[in-house]
Amino acid sequence: MGNFAPQIVKDGVIIQIPFHVAHNTYMDVAANMGLSGLIPFVGVLIGSVFTLRKVVKRATAPEDVVVRQVALGLQAGILGYMVCAFFLSTLWLQVFWLCTFLTMSLPRLLHLSHVPSKKTPSCARPGPNEEL
């Protein structure tokens, strides 16, 4: 990390720069981690978009409206981030990773919403026509 030099040389004089980033997330990731870091980073971006696309397609039941809306919102957010990453530095990656981890959990949430519950409440009271 930090392969961008915090100094520049101008007319033979070394000038220290207090804040130094690539101003491009892809360029910064490539400079810090090389292709072995850039390729998985872009793969996570593209994989997240495709995972959210699958969730949107599968969430067709009326009870899946919230999951579908969250998936659409995350998909729009990640696509927006992919464009904005050309103009933002890596200082804003925390929100990206939050969206990525939420993306990983949505297929499981969608699956759990379709699994019927087999548990019966242990403190259920009998109805007026039922015996104890």
Image (cartoon, helix red, strand yellow):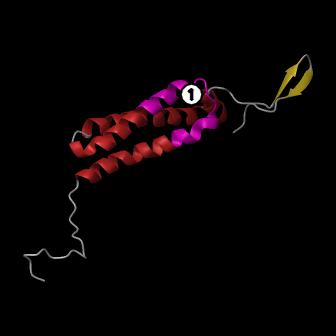
Q: Can residue 107 be seen from the camera position used here?
A: yes
Question: What is the secondary structure assignment of the residue under circle 1?
Answer: loop
Tell me the quarter of the image containing the N terminus.
Answer: top right
Crowd around label 1: few <14 · some 14–19 · many ≥20 (10 Å):
some
Residue located at (47% from left, 37% from top)? 44
Pointer 1: what residue? 85
Residue 26 place in picture, x, y as percent: 58, 28
Residue 124 place in picture, x, y as percent: 21, 74
Residue extending furthest front? 128
- Magenta region: 76-97
> Compared with residue 117, is residue 32 higher up or lower down, i.e. above or below?
above
Residue 122 place in picture, x, y as percent: 25, 75
Q: Can residue 51 be seen from the camera position used here?
A: no
Query: Looking at numbered disc 1 in the image, what kind of residue is underneath it?
Result: Ala
Residue 73 place in picture, x, y as percent: 40, 35
Query: Is 85 included in the stretch rendered in magenta?
Result: yes
